[in-house]
Amino acid sequence: MDTRGTELHFHALHGLDDGPTTLAESVELLRLAAQDGTATVVATPHVRPDFVTDVSDLPDRVRELGQAAAAEAIEMELRTGGELGHDMVGRLSQIDLNLIANGPPSGRWLLVEAPFHSIDEDFHAATDELRDRGFGVLIAHPERSADAILDGATGLRQELAAGSLAQVNAQSITGDHGPDARAAALELIADGLVSVVASDAHGPTRPPVLSEVRRLLADDGFDVGLCRSLTVGCPRGLLARGIRRAALVA
């Protein structure tokens, strides 16, 4: 059985957002991911007004990075994605959204960034629009939002009821995002609200740490099978089978 990790949230592309600044830095980040036991990375630059607003060249950027990594003998499957800001949903065409979506035609989905302030009605309206346009939703780092830290994850639970899934950051679990994010992440996982853990890697100070997270979660008393599912099984399944637009919780 292949136990190598799959990263669904990873800022691999250089010169686009707050991730790597050079192609060499991007290649090194992939080298670290490979050394950490990862086989597949979805490159997810910020798609929002302050970073990427035109996604048309992202597949070419992914191909360029893949060729550079292969030249360095780094074995890594790279896919095109994006960390979509909810305020960009109405600005992107169906073609644009498909460029940064993943999953099969019957279950295409998008990674949507949870706002740090809250998961509010504007956010719900944006994800409802995505579902109306045929996409499932994977919510990035809800544990870093005030919704989870202060509001009992009310907004997240509403999203899960609508069919969204949740992705927690590995560095929340390691404590590098602070004690509040760590406590919120562990609570969300314990409550069964999380489907995926991803590194949200950006560079040397935010590296790939999926293998460390599996050990930490086991130390925190979580089942080893769950730890593997969050970092291997479910992420891989989302790429292969996608997200079905059906509620997970009542």
Image (cartoon, helix red, strand yellow):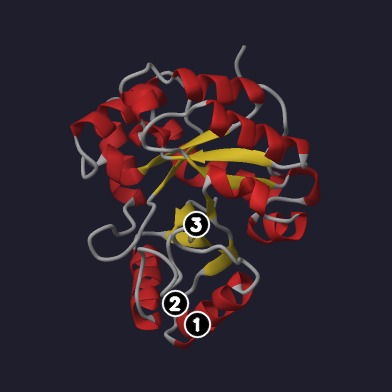
Asked whether disc 1 touches disc 2, contact meaning CB atoms under 8 Å apart, the reply is: yes
Nearer the camera: disc 3 or disc 2:
3
Tell me the residue at 50%/59% (across/down).
44
Q: Secondary structure at mark 1?
A: helix
Q: Position of residue 245 (x, y in %)?
A: 72, 31
Relative height, residue 6 to residue 191 (above, below): below
Say which quadrant the C terminus sits in. Answer: top right
Q: Position of residue 191 (x, y in %)?
A: 42, 18
Q: Give the number of marks.
A: 3
Q: Amino acid at mark 2?
A: Ile
Check disc 3 and report the residue beneath it.
49
First along the sequence among labels 1 and 3: 3
Asked whether disc 3 touches disc 2, contact meaning CB atoms under 8 Å apart, the reply is: no
Q: Position of residue 221 (x, y in %)?
A: 29, 25
Check disc 1 and report the residue beneath it.
70
Tell me the residue at 41%/39% (across/down).
141
Q: Amino acid at mark 1?
A: Ala
Check disc 2 and report the residue beneath it.
74
Q: Secondary structure at mark 2?
A: loop
Relative height, residue 205 to residue 155 (above, below): below
Any mark on residue 36, and which? none
Residue furthest to the top in view is 250
Q: Amino acid at mark 3?
A: Pro
Cα gap from disc 1 to disc 3, whole angstroms: 32 Å
